[in-house]
Amino acid sequence: MAYVNEAAAGGDKEPRTERGRKTLRRLIEAAAAEFGDRGFHEAAITGITQRAGVALGTFYTYFESKEEVFRALVRDMSRATRAHVAEAVKGAPDRLAAERIGLEAFIAFVRQHPELYRIIEEAQFVAQDVYREHYRSFADAYVRNLAGARDRGEIADGLDEPRAWALIGMSVFLGMRYGLWDEDLSPAEVADTAIALVSEGLRKR
Amino acid sequence: MAYVNEAAAGGDKEPRTERGRKTLRRLIEAAAAEFGDRGFHEAAITGITQRAGVALGTFYTYFESKEEVFRALVRDMSRATRAHVAEAVKGAPDRLAAERIGLEAFIAFVRQHPELYRIIEEAQFVAQDVYREHYRSFADAYVRNLAGARDRGEIADGLDEPRAWALIGMSVFLGMRYGLWDEDLSPAEVADTAIALVSEGLRKR
């Protein structure tokens, strides 16, 4: 499963042993399934521990509440999504090529992880600060990438921050429409069209 | 209040008298305040009727349940948002100018109606079909506008549907970041930057 990485839960209860880290990973994966299937309000800690195959008491070694595991899950999914896209674009020759590859990889990732949207979007109502942190982290990375590309003369001048939010919104909505809802175009077709728009602009020349 | 228009609730219970239409408008406006302040789960029908200054029984003349008034509200906000943007862009000389004016108008609208996001976004969890209908209606209108502009030679060739979803996502995220969360740039500054990106593209020339 793609979501879990080393710093999954963070905070005070970071496990010190390999076995502890494995249990934490199982809990986070089980939480993704439980929250993804049932939503925050219907989800139960016992649903998570049953899916993870651990005792209820074990849950409380790692998390204090349903909200705490939800917050850890959103942060974990956020990091995993960024890591997946960053890995995909690693060899890209320039920023515009990276945009194209990254968008295709993101839409493909959504198809493999349809629970991603439900969980991230529900964070708006359960843990608004983690929701904002998720998108602000994406935006910060984007601003750095755009500034670097501007310095190298790859992209035109402009305010990087609103450009970053525009590009994130585009990806989120294309992921929702062509990753989550329907698959009437391939991730490559969607990325080709959207990146032609972003690179060359709509204006007819 | 900007949300309410003639066909507010739709369906079987469309009021026939002017007085009935006024009461329905008051209920929809009260529902926007109640759901916007408290969210769907905490909101109460009695909260809506108290805000509207009508008897509880009156509510049931128009709606069968909290979910039904919520659905009517989402549809009403959706129509009102589209109508507001359509009105703003009416005199625009071409599609790219309309994009710029429409985005500025949308961000300004969000600042005046911060409850818009909470209510539309919560529809994902309360009435997923109405949520999808909201964005699909926007996309349909966008596809028609892009096709028209393509026919008139104003914009480059490309698949209109993914371009429409890209542009909608961009607007939604810029509205969230610069309309709802922070006001560190003016709607005009955000629209200028984003529409330069959309019209001319990122590529340095």
Image (cartoon, coloured by chain):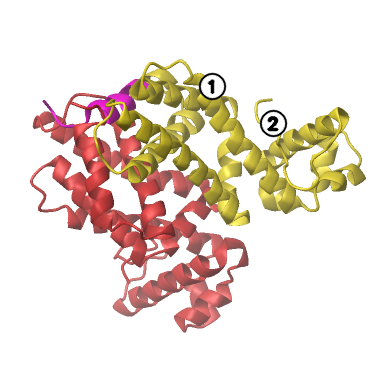
Chain colours: A red, B yellow
Q: Which quarter of the picture shows residue B120? A: top right
Neighbour class for label 2 at 10 Å: few (<14), some, many (≥20)? Answer: many
- Tag 1: amino acid: Glu
Q: Are marks 1 and 2 on the same chain?
A: yes
Foreground pick, B160 / A79 = B160
Provide residue A49's location: percent of width, then percent of height: 51, 78
Foreground pick, A123 / A9 = A123
Quarter of the image for the C terminus of chain B: give it. top left
The span picked out in magenta is B191-205
Foreground pick, A22 / A121 = A121
Quarter of the image for the N terminus of chain B: give it. top right
To which chain does the residue with label 1 belong? B
Q: Which quarter of the picture shows residue A3? A: bottom left
Q: Secondary structure at mark 1?
A: helix
Q: Secondary structure at mark 2?
A: loop
At x 46%, y 15%, the residue is: B91
Which SS does the magenta portion mostly show? helix
At x 37%, y 65%, the residue is: A113
Total number of numbered discs in the rendering: 2
Q: Is residue B185 visible?
A: no
- Tag 2: amino acid: Val
Q: Which residue is mark 2?
A: B4
Q: Which residue is mark 1?
A: B87
Provide residue B128's location: percent of width, then percent of height: 57, 55
